[in-house]
Image (tube, grey):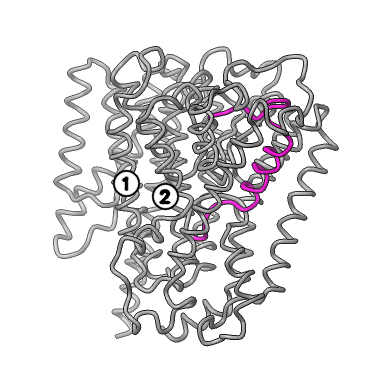
Amino acid sequence: MASQQATNCETTSAAHARSYALGAALALAVGTNLYRDGDGVLLAPSVAVVALHVPLFSLAIFQLISSRQNRDKPLLVTPAFCNAGLMLAAMGGAVAIAAVRGDVTVGLLAFVFFAVGCRVLSFIMALMAFCEEQIASPIALMRRLAPFWFVCAIVIGGMLALPCATNPGVPDYKYDAFGHISACVQTAMSVACLQGATALDIQGDLQPFGQLLLWALLQLSGVCFAIIALALVRPFLARPPTVRRVLSIAILLQLVGAAVLFPAWNASDTPTTLSRVWWSLLHSSSALWNGGVTLSPAGLANYLDAPLVFLVITALSVIGSLGIPVAIALLQRAPTEVETSGTPLRGNFPTIEALLAFQMLAITTVGLVWVEHPTGPFASNRPAFPFEIDQQQPALQEMDGPARWQAAVYTSATARSAGMSGVPVSQGTLSWSSVALMFGNMLGGGGLAGTGGGLRITFLIFLFVGMVGRKSKAAYPALPSAWRVLIAVMTWLAFNALSIAVMLAIVDAAEYGIVFDSIAAANSNGYATGLTPYLPPVAKLVLTAILLIGRWLPLLIWYWLLRSFLVRKRAAG
């Protein structure tokens, strides 16, 4: 027995050593391929490129040899998730590509793509298995996902600063390298926090490779926050879905949304079929994950009168802010009394959350139309226009009746969390009442099961229950008291106030823009006045910190609010 345990330990240690060696060799190969100029041409000599790929190919050959000697054991050396036959096919394909293209570096790049894909797929499968296992413990998921998410955001932010990711002329390493790197980090962190008010123009400043990196980061962040949201809301659902089901539906919704959006784009924005596919996929993903990312500096203002864009973006934004688990529960048959016996609010949480969300949508829509009416009582109750006015987007007050209603519905759906700009919010374009409505939606944010920002409007449900419904304790077991909810609200308001105060202290600009963009950043909302690209590097890094805290603090607050019930539920399960 002891000898068998020693053998198993040796095997495990050897597997870990080979895995680390593969990671180092793969990182070396990836770094070599990233050392390119803006046209994608490798900057290192071909001999050096080949030499730097030797460790990866050596491990691949060792994989083939070891697999023939150990047919009765699982493969310990990877690129993970591939067997010897697939490895041999990939190596042969790389050689064939190099021969056809007449360039060995192209074949090397193809094999590196294969190795990275296998490694990423293996990691994702292991991570999904962990999430399924720990779905009853939100804090365990946060501990595992938060470091991985943060490292990916920082790494991608650094990669955006490379010549192969930014367009020529954008980076100025000689005179302002720190400024460019800070802009790249802020852009990556903004996308990672699902906010989308980036320092760089995604369409104009980034190469296709850089845009693809941000889309991958958007997907990764959406998945991470969707899993954590599922863990938090799971005890309130009579039949909670699995992680796999939620993510499968998310993929399906994005693909369906992209397919519907495909014919809707203007030829001036999408001159090729590939660009049309890219616009459709990115905006569909951004809407569902409430990411706030758009490929046009003017947002989607030019497409508010396009029915397909309006319907798809609005619908996906509402589903994303409400949460796929809640949407699934609303479409299922009504739960039985047995299924709801141990569930707070008697299994009615999805219905209550949805009604609250649509009430906020209706109130905000009617409010925006009323206060922005050009002859209404609030027509002149607005900040003074600055010297220069952004004319890319028509203001709500300048629209005719039907257009104003449509824009108000879109703004109401996206103001809570998605933030995919459709109307201008710069100084003078909204009345003070509309600004207050926007701030209220941002602070409230999405639902507990969604990927939106803000504190989450679910606090209104628990505040009402804590103040009115505590007499019926059997119907509301272990829910947070009104005092705990009020403490959470005050904490969130204090963080927003501190964010505004810090930005006012370090930024020399109009107070209106600083306050608006600070609240938008703290609540992960993409509506912004356009101040971010013009901030000094230090202010961009401070704004990045605000984004980071604003994305994770509400999740920690909700875990604190629900901790007693989550622990009790997990112990009972």
Q: Is residue 163 magenta?
A: no
- What segment carries the magenta color? 422-448
Chain-order first, disc 2 or disc 1: 1
Residue depicted at 48% across the width and 28% down the height: 402
Disc 2 crowd, CA 10 A, few/some/many (<14, 14-19, 20+)? many
Q: Is residue 435 magenta?
A: yes
Give the secondary structure at mark 2.
helix
Task: From the top left corner, tell me how far across and down residue 105 is, in percent.
Answer: 31, 22
Mark number displayed over residue 251: 1
Residue depicted at 70% across the width and 43% down the height: 436
245 vs 490, nearest the viewer: 490
Q: Is residue 380 above or below residue 490?
A: above
Task: Determine which residue is flagged by label 2.
Answer: 319
Q: Amino acid at mark 2?
A: Ile
Q: Mark 2 against mark 1, which lies toward the viewer? A: 2
Task: From the top left corner, tell me how far across and down residue 76 is, in percent.
Answer: 28, 58
| Residue 268 horizontal side relative to residue 478, left or right | left
